[in-house]
Image: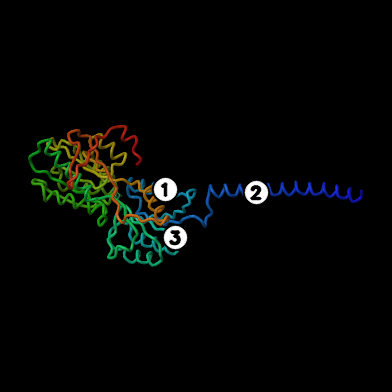
Amino acid sequence: MIRKGSDSLSGTGRTALLILAALIMGFILSGCKGEDEEAAELPEEESLVTIGFSQIGSESDWRMASTKSVQDAFLAEDGYSLIFNDGQQKQENQIKAIREFIDQDVDYILLDPCVETGWDSALLEAKEAGIPVIVYDREVKVSDESLYTAWMGSDFYLEGQRACKWLYEYLKRIKHSGEVNIVDIQGTLGSSAQMGRTKALEDAVREYPGWNLLDQATGEFTTSKGKEVMEDMLIKHGGNIDIVYCENDNEAYGAIEAIENAGYRIGPDIGGYEMLIMSFDSTREGLRLTEEEKIAVNTECSPLYGPRLRSMIEALRAGKEVPFKTFIEEGQFSAFTGIREVSADGTDYAVTIVNDALIEEREY
Ligand code: GYE
């Protein structure tokens, strides 16, 4: 009895203990699950892939859109920690940033180089530290191409060729037989975007009879410098200017202001004393001005690199091979309906007639 009683007593105790144990286990398990879920939402700091991002600066609408695109593509919730550095348009700042990223032992470096040359030592240091560098948008010219992992960006010379070819076709369509006087507001000197676009214009001037390059100066890809340079050119050449070749949209905004302030007319009617403006980037504002015919032709240059760079880094992390050079496909816009395509380098490229819906949809 006693035994039985003590047995039945210990049976009750065991049940209670089992229930308690089950409750504790359940609590622990549910606690663990909660932590797991949290971990899925936001990875631990140490498990994040760190990326040092050396950006040129904030000189243009294009640049701001490009920064945002990259920042949005590498979020902590997706497993990334992006360290952003603004180079303020100075190569020395970008080189310093690369060295800091090496000290921080980041997993990857993203570099949009302000100019093409002068990167050898910084890139060698990154290579020696075993950190892959992905160069994008503008290019670097280094003695040893194995100093960086890959590059992706635009073919700036082709952009310039397409712009000049459009002008050539346009002059034919309007039966402009005389000379045309062109001024070139260049981008940041020594940058791939400037060199490609400038060279394409210089080559076209050599190729097409009657095309005169009156003047060339850098507007540094900014609205304020674009305006300043245009003011100077108007003082020097006045109404002799037929074509203003702006190497980006921000320079075109500045040039438009300067031309209108000086009392000249802007538009495609160069025979009727209007100055025809050409531009690159095709930002939303740039396209709006294209629709208004203040910019006659706008050759696109996409700043939306974030998702492309992320795919590249994902491929590298998965141990896949990535192409060493990738060119981005781009469009061209105008309000002039008489030209629907231009050919450059043996290829026909479509010219899109700009409209409200297109401007509305524009991401940058
Ligand atoms: O055209 C300009 C920017 O490197 C392609 O830089 C880029 C150029 C772009 O400031 O707006």
Bin the neighbour count of mark 2 within 10 Å (Cα to Cα): few under 14, some 14-19, many 20 and up.
Answer: few
How many numbered discs? 3
Q: Nearer the viewer, residue 306 or 224?
A: 306
| Labels 1 and 3 touching (C-beta < 8 A) | no
Q: Which residue is mark 2?
A: 29
Q: Quadrant of residue 259?
A: top left
In this view of the protein, which residue sits in the foreground, 21 or 85? 21
**Along the horizontal axis of the image, is 28 left or right of 142?**
right
Q: Which residue is mark 1?
A: 73
Please name the amino acid that badge 3 sits on: Val
Residue 126 locus on image (x, y percent): 38, 64
| Real-space Cα separation, disc 1 to disc 3, in angstroms | 17 Å
Mark closer to the observer (2, 3) = 2
- Which structural element holds mark 1? helix
Sequence-first tag of 2 and 1: 2
Which residue matches tag 3? 106
The answer to whether residue 124 is above or below residue 18 is below
- Taking the image as shown, residue 317 lies to the left or right of residue 303, namely right
Work out which quarter of the rendered image holds the C terminus and state it: top left
Tell me: is circle 2 under 8 Å from ligand 1: no
Residue 328 in the image: state x and y as whole percent. 29, 48
The colour scheme applied to this rendered structure is rainbow
Disc 2 secondary structure class: helix
Residue type indicated by callout 1? Ala
As shown in the figure, which amino acid type bears the numbered disc 2? Leu
Q: CA distance from mark 2 to mark 3?
A: 35 Å
Task: Look at 45% across and 62% down and name the residue there.
Answer: 105
Q: Residue at x 23, y 54 (%)?
A: 195
Q: Earlier in the sequence, mark 1 or mark 3?
A: 1
Q: Quadrant of residue 355?
A: top left
Q: In front: 345, or 98?
A: 345
